[in-house]
Image: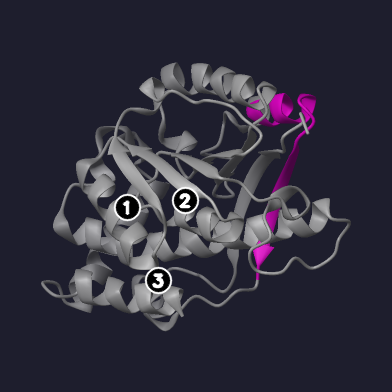
Amino acid sequence: MAVEDWLKALDERHLSDLTPAEVTRALRALSSCYVERRDKLARGGALDGAGKRAAFALFYGPQHFFVTREILRALGGAEAGGSEPAPGDGPAGGKRYSRVVDLGCGTGTAGAAAAMETGATVEAFDLNPWAVGESNWTYRTLGIRGRALLSNIDTVKITGSRDTLVLAAYAVNELTAEIRRPLLLRLEDAGARGASVLVIEPIGRRVNRWWDEWAGAFLAAGGRQDDWRFRVALPARQRNLAKAAGLDVQELTARSLFCPSLSE
């Protein structure tokens, strides 16, 4: 019920000053930014207006929530030998964490899904002040213990321990190569210290040119890479926005890199 209440509150929050038609137009522009003009992402172009911010929160936020939730459940089932995990089970055979460190948290929805699935508290970081505020609203609305702070990913201290899941969902592809390369080393170090690490990105080889290097590093550390396709229906608001904007959401897709704690 908490998720349904959050989605209802999300509608009320972002449609109080904008019509669905205005959000739809902004969603078209936002999706174009992601697919065709990714150079704008590093400059904050994805969230440079009220319409785009509302479109991101109303469409991509819930999508990231459900994708992250399904990946965690699928990883849990795979690590447990293929059994179907129950809600609350986390990755690595139902492992539960006390901390989720969410790097580039956006509106906080991926970290929120991870917290709800694993029983953890969220420590989130993002460079965009609006996103930080929106993340903290997400946590309050969903009843999650957590806090988002304003910070560059390259300055966040990533500590590794067996009770920590480090999450980078839909964030790494937006980084410059100068930040992305040392981030991989820092994630490897966190994994060596006992943390589990999960990276989630859209399926799209054209925009994920760094993926092979990262996948090789995760596999060498005992991790895995996966492409996911989930037949999970988005809520009505998100389906309607997608249809109006000409987006196909018949299934939720993503790719992930996951390395469980190897220091049990």
User: Distance between the Cα atoms at labels 2 and 3?
Assistant: 28 Å
Residue drawn at x 63%, y 64% is 88
Examine the rendered structure and indicate whether residue 116 appears above or below residue 179. Answer: below
Residue drawn at x 32%, y 33% is 42
Residue 135: numbered disc:
1
What amino acid is labelled 3 in the image? Gly
**Count of marks overlaid on the render:** 3
Residue situated in front as seen by the camera: 113 or 15:
113
Q: Regarding mark 3 in the picture, which secondary structure is present there?
A: loop
Residue, disc 2: 111
How busy is the neighbourhood of tag 1: few (under 14 within 10 Å), some, or many (20 plus)? many
In front: label 1 or label 3: 1
Residue drawn at x 51%, y 16% is 182
Q: Position of residue 139 (x, y in %)?
A: 36, 58
What amino acid is labelled 1 in the image? Ser
What amino acid is labelled 2 in the image? Gly
In front: label 2 or label 3: 2
In the rendered image, the residue lying farthest to the left is: 17
Residue, disc 3: 246
Residue situated in front as seen by the camera: 53 or 89:
89
Q: Position of residue 122 (x, y in %)?
A: 44, 46
- Identify the magenta region: 214-230
Q: Position of residue 249 (x, y in %)?
A: 51, 70
User: Distance between the Cα atoms at labels 2 and 1?
Assistant: 9 Å
